[in-house]
Every structure is written in structure tokens, then in C-alpha cells.
Amino acid sequence: MASTDIEISQDPDAPTEDNRVSAAAAESTFAAEDDSERITPAIEFRDVHLAFDDRKVLDGLSFTVAKGETKIILGGSGCGKSTTIKLVLGLLKPDAGQILVNGEDITHYTEAEMMRVRKNFGMVFQEGALFDSLSVYENVAYRLHEQGIPEEDVEQEVRRMLRFVNLEDAIDKMPAELSGGMRRRVGIARALVGGPTIVMFDEPTAGLDPPTARTICELAIKLRDLEDVSSIFVTHEMNNVEYLSREFAAVNDAGEVIFEQEGERLCLINTKLLMMKEGNIIFSGTDEMLKKTEDPYIKKFLRGH
Amino acid sequence: MNIAIRSLLEVQETSLLVWRAARRLFRRPTYFNEMIAQMDVIGVGSLTIIVLTGFFTGGVLTLQTFPTLKYYGAQDQTGFLVALSLVRELGPVLTALMVTGRVGSAISAELGSMVVSQQIDAMRALGTDPVRKLVAPRLVALFITLPLLTVAADVVGIVGGGAVATTLYGQSASTFLSSVRYGITFDDMIGGVIKPLVFALILGSISCYKGLSTDGGTVGVGRSTTSAVVTSSIVVIIADFFLAKALQVILDMPGT
């Protein structure tokens, strides 16, 4: 590995296969860096405060989620994680502060204005929140039906999305017939219809068995690395953090999606962590930094005792 | 927050909900299919209980009034009394109460369950306004079907009254019917249709509001359903009194 690097640096003009690929990759990376659109964060919170009656839920929350970045929000129950997501979607309004989506200040938007902004969003709810009275097909097709898109296009898109979450067989089932993990995956398919650029996951793996939880994390990784989606991933499970901040998705020569661990060759920089406690951010940084922290609360959270 | 302020706040919120539903009724997308489905559930689905209620209410009215009228020698007026009671009061009020019990509770429970299972949030997140998609079609369906159900209850009630008068008291059907025709005026019929329109608004808006303002999980759904039925029933009965007085003045009926 190291010898290859030295070889390239010694003779940059050598037209080897490896060199050509990395030059193209570098070019696209710099093109992305130069794109002013990408500099604007996908989501930005500026000193956001929120209280329900006398109880403070968020106390001056400030953070940004860059384009293509996954922000994992960690924290115990009731620390304001889900509330943060609801604020981004405009389902709740802050008492003070500003919330920006793609540089647009949505803090004081009316419900009608928010409807337009929400077209950029996909939201995966804790229990899936599927519409009980609609079949899997109708649930996933919901957004497209609302937009009045022709049925044949709708079916094509719904099948594509269900294939993405590996559930095409369940297309005609009702939500009550699905297991918890399947409901979550249908919820993800429904959130991804229409190609949202920002996706929010609200504890998508809570209460699921480890393999299903892993599948859901893989979906989030695929979205991040292959679809350039920005996301907020709320969780309190450390194995989710491990998957999301250590692994990346790539497409191999056979066109299959593969998952690889970051290592010496590649260090993931598109996943950051945020830890909340009682409406405040107590940590912000990478997973490596989180593990090295000396904060007793965080240490206890990571160890579990 | 004391109970008076809370009640006032609820009245304000319910009124705002109706206003929002009415304002967005004609904007695209219009949920026409949803309205038809709701009319089927609310209107056609309630027909059986309304017919039964109407028939036996008309019957018991004859049963109770015929002997009294006979005491004064006015038994020929039974049809008049039964029809007037039904068209002016019992038809609209009993229909509204029966529909509150059957439909108001269902609306509140359905919307409440959608709130606690985050389906309402999901709907908003997917870019649909729940007021337009869920509240407006239910209000429109109630607005159209409640007067129709009331008319059905009135007609069946008169038939029930006639059946009791002819079978139990031996009155001829023609005497009963001519007394009905003599007793009811066009104004009574107008009043009998205006009332259910107001009741539809009351029970629809209260049930939808209670459902959408549910909190506290499944216990909360039970609480909001009970509250929807109790509040709607009481408000319907109170509103009936004031409506009766208002209609007397507006339609210049006897009693003003």
C-alpha cells in the first residue's frame, strides 16, 4: 500500500492504471470542493431554543450538516434528539434561533411554505409510521400519488425503491402483516421516493434484531456514499455508530454494492457525531475523538455502565 | 390554566380548524374520492341505525300521545303532533346524537391513533396537509349526509307513528296522514334541514379537533374519543335550544 503511494509521488506522470483513476477521483473531488453550492450546509441550526411549558427541551442548539454528510446524533432518551429532527421538518417551531435548510431560513415559514421545503426531505420514523389503511405499494407510492404522477411511472418507481430496500415481494401486503424490520424498511422506501437530498432517520434500528439493524445501517451508508444524500441519523445504539463511521459503500467491477472498512487508504470524513444531553451539545466530532474523550457521561454512555 | 380559559382555547382551536379546512377545500389537490368514501362510511353506514331510531321514536310518540289526545277528544291530531315533534326536534337531534356516537367516536379514534403512531407527522413530512386530506372530506361528508339522514329519520318516524296509530289504536291511515299533511309547513321542513347542517359542523369539527389534539399514547386515544362524543352531544343539545329560538324568529314561526 505504502509502496504504491511512494511510487506515484516519485513519478507522477507515469500512466499506470491506479494513477489514472486517482487523478480522475481527485479532479471530481476538487470540482465538488469548488462548487459554491456544496459549501452551503444542507442543515444549519443557529442557537435554537425550545421549551414545552416550563420544560426546556433545546437550550441554544447550534450545528451544521454539510452536503453529503451524515450526522449521527447520540444521546439518552428525552435529550431532544427526535425534537431536533421535527424542527428541521417544520413539524415543530423553535421559540428562538434560526434553522436553515440549503441556506434558506425556514424558521418562520408557514405550513404552506414548509410543504415546498419538505419535498427535499425524506423522513424515517421510529416505528415506520406507515399508513395502516394503505398497502405497502400505496404507502411507498403516497408522495407520487399526491403529485398526480401517472400510475405506470408510479409503479416503476415504487418497485425500484422496494428493490433498494430488498422488499419487492411484500408489495401487496398491508402494514399489519409486516414484521418490525420490514415496516422500517418500507418506511425507508417511502421516505426515499422522489429522490430527497436530505434524509432523517429517527432511531431506525430501535428494537430490531442485529442483522436487520445492520441492513438498515447499510441502507443509510448506501444513501450517503452512492446517492450523495445528507442525513441526520438519530440513535442511541453504539453498533450503528460503528457501522456508519467505519464503513463505506462502493460498487465493484461486477456492479454490486460492497461494504468496506475504512483503513490506511481511506478515512471516512463524511460522518460526524454529535452527542446531546438535556438539550445541549456535549460533544461534536469524529468517532475516534468520541472514544478518546474524558467526559464521564460520554464514557459511561459508551461503556453502558 | 383554568377550565374557562381552556374551554375558550378549545373553541378557538376548533374554529380555526374548520376555517383552515374550508379555506383549503377548493385548492388542488382536492380529495374528491376521499369525500365519496367518507360519505359512504358516514351516510350509508349510519342508515340502519337511523332508520331503527326514527321508526321506534315515531312509534313511541304515538304510543304516548294518542291516549292523552283521546282524553281531550283530539286523537285525530296525533299525526300532526308526531310529525311536528319529529321534523322540528327529534329527527335532527336524535340523528345528530346517533351519528355522534357512531361516526364522531370513529373519527376521533382514527385521527387520534394516527397522531400517536406518528402517521400525521409522516403525512406532513410527505408534503400533505392533514387538514385538507383528513378533516375537510369528513366535514363535507357530514355536511351532505347528516341532513339526508335526518330526512330519512323523519320519514321513517312518521311511518312508525302511523303504524302504531293504525295497528294499536285502530286509527285509519288516511286520518293519520291528513293530520300529518295539515300539521307540517314548509318552514318546518326548512328548519329541520338547517339544524342538521349546524349539527354536522359541530360534531365534525369537535371530533376532528379532539382526534388531532390527542396526546399520551393509547390511553390518550380513549380519552379523546370519550371527550369527542360527550362534548359533541352536549354542544348539539345546547345548540338545538338556541337554534330553535333563532329559527322561530327567522322563519316567523308560532312562539315568537
Image (spheres, coloured by chain):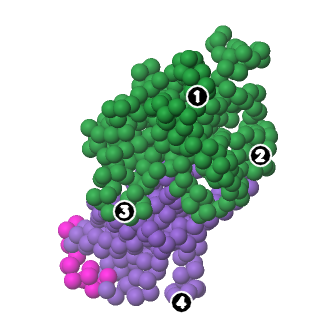
Q: What's the residue type where badge 3 is placed?
A: Ile
Residue under numbered circle 3: A149
Q: What's the residue type where badge 4 is placed?
A: Asp
- The residue stretch that appears in magenta: B167-180
Determine whether label 2 and label 1 are within 8 Å by CB.
Answer: no
A68 shown above or below B3: above
Residue under numbered circle 4: B252
Front-most of residues B147 and A167 = A167
Determine whether label 2 and label 3 are within 8 Å by CB.
Answer: no
Residue under numbered circle 2: A46
Secondary structure at numbered mark 4:
loop
Dots 2 and 4 on the same chain: no
Dots 2 and 3 on the same chain: yes
Front-most of residues B39 and B186 = B39
Front-most of residues B229 and A126 = A126
Secondary structure at numbered mark 3:
loop
Q: What's the residue type where badge 2 is placed?
A: Arg
Q: Chain coloured green: which letter?
A: A
A216 shown above or below A124: above
- Where is residue B169? Give x, y as percent: 24, 70
Q: Is residue B172 magenta?
A: yes
Q: Residue at x 34, y 45 (%)?
A: A160
A3 shown above or below B213: above
Q: Chain of mark 3?
A: A
Few, some or many residues within 10 Å of mark 4 (<14, 14–19, 20+): few
Specify the farthest residue to the top.
A305
Q: What's the residue type where badge 1 is placed?
A: Asp
Residue under numbered circle 1: A11
